[in-house]
Amino acid sequence: MLGQDNPLFDINNITMKEFKDINDILDFAINEEQKAIDFYNILAEKSTNDDVKTVFIDFVKEEMNHKARLEKIKAEKQFTIEDKVIADLKIADYLVSVKITSDMKYEDALVIAMKKEKAAFKLYMDLAEKAPNAKMKSVFISLAQEESKHKLKFEIEYDEFVMREN
């Protein structure tokens, strides 16, 4: 199903669970990246607009890179936490949700991506608040920062190619 009632779209419907260690967190994050890959693949397959299809395929590749990065971190047991603030243009905060359709426009695809990344950021921040210890909290905050970077990328794209055209 292509609509927003698709469970792959609603990252906020994730049941909070207990994480025993960093590997549990990484497994969870890897699974979330796979859900994003599946989501964007479905949208690419259903899209009748070739430009939007290409955008979704690019999103799939990006999410695959995120998943591979997390798998490498898990395999190498090397999780470094960057202490840096990511800019937030807050564009996604002021956009209305768009209906997912097979013939959506490029700007609508960007809105979906921004909203999805914002939801992922919120999820990891919520998990950080509930983390049982400082190390797990910092891992969740780092994952939230990654999602914030992804959202910023889409906001910049939206700003440059949609807002400036209008």
Image (cartoon, rainbow, N blue to C red):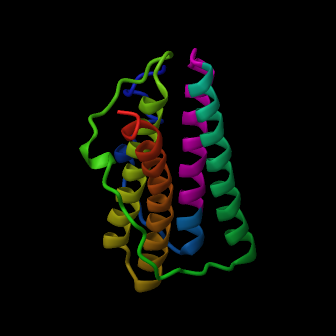
Residue visible at 50% across and 16% down in the picture: 102
Please say if 61 is above or below 49: below
Q: x%, y% of residue 157?
A: 49, 46
Magenta residues? Answer: 27-49
Q: The C terminus is located in which quarter?
A: top left
Residue visible at 44% across and 18% down in the picture: 101
Q: x%, y% of residue 41?
A: 62, 31
Which quadrant would residue 30 be assigned to in this image? bottom right
Which secondary structure type mostly characterizes the magenta part of the structure? Answer: helix
Residue visible at 44% across and 65% down in the picture: 144
Q: Is residue 50 magenta?
A: no
Q: Seen in the image, is 108 located left or right of residue 31?
A: left
Residue visible at 47% across and 39% down in the picture: 161
Q: x%, y% of residue 87?
A: 39, 66
Q: x%, y% of residue 125?
A: 35, 65
Please say if 133 is above or below 1: below
In the image, 84 versus 164, the foreground residue is 164
Q: How many marks?
A: 0
Q: Seen in the image, is 54 located left or right of residue 28?
A: right
Please say if 134 is above or below 28: below
Q: Is residue 38 magenta?
A: yes
Please say if 80 is above or below 69: below
